[in-house]
Image (cartoon, rainbow, N blue to C red):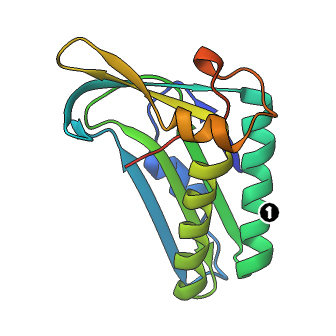
Amino acid sequence: MNRFRLTGEPLDLAALRAELADPGCGGFVAFEGWVRNFNDGREVRRLEYEAYVPLALREGERIIAEACERFGVTRVLCVHRVGTLAIGELAVWVGVSAPHRDEAFRACRHVIDEVKHRVPIWKQEHYVDGLSGWVNCERCAADSHEHAGAPDGQRHGHGHG
């Protein structure tokens, strides 16, 4: 089963946690990124996430493999929503099981930071005033021009929580 997933459906946290259960692990850490109602001085009404799916899945798996090797963790899972999300909905979830808590905390932080930086998922904020804008696409377009499929000709990355 894939350790990095994209879904248009709400996340079942109990099922995700159950996938990470391991009797050899004493530590479990999770990160939840929720849709917030305010960003950069603007009131947000909803978000839309788009992804370049084949590359997103490959890069997400690569990030998880790096975390397992670097931090010696046993199990890692990351699920990111795509599509339209309302305020308060869960947009991304990372869970890590490890023999000890320190490795679990460090691996979880590594995964979410790298997913935000490297995985081609784009976030469009829709504001209360009726306008909308793609978040972080200008910076990402300057960083990387090798990936096709981004909205409005932009190229890579996104932001959360």
User: Who is closer to the viewer here, 126 or 14?
Assistant: 126
Q: Residue at x 81, y 42 (%)?
A: 58
Label 1 belongs to which residue?
A: 65
User: Who is closer to the viewer here, 139 or 88?
Assistant: 139
Where on the picture, by quarter, is residue 96?
Answer: bottom right
* View extreme (top): residue: 130
Q: Is residue 107 left or right of residue 10?
A: right
Q: Position of residue 60 (x, y in %)?
A: 72, 48
Q: Residue at x 68, y 67 (%)?
A: 75
Q: Is residue 83 in sight in this rendering? A: yes
Picture quarter with the N terminus: top right
Q: Is residue 43 left or right of residue 77?
A: left
Q: Is residue 148 left or right of residue 116?
A: right
Q: Residue at x 17, y 15 (%)?
A: 129
Q: Position of residue 134 (x, y in %)?
A: 46, 26
Q: Secondary structure at mark 1?
A: helix
Q: Is residue 82 left or right of residue 20?
A: left
Where on the picture, by quarter, is residue 69?
Answer: bottom right
Q: Residue at x 73, y 58 (%)?
A: 63
Where on the picture, by quarter, is residue 89?
Answer: top left
Q: Residues within 10 Å of mark 1 (few under 14, many from 20)?
A: some
Q: Is residue 2 in sight in this rendering? A: no
Q: Position of residue 40 (x, y in %)?
A: 27, 41
Amino acid type shown at disc 1: Ala
Q: Position of residue 88 (x, y in %)?
A: 26, 38
User: Who is closer to the viewer here, 103 or 146?
Assistant: 146
**Relative to 4, does residue 64 appear above or below in the rendering?**
below
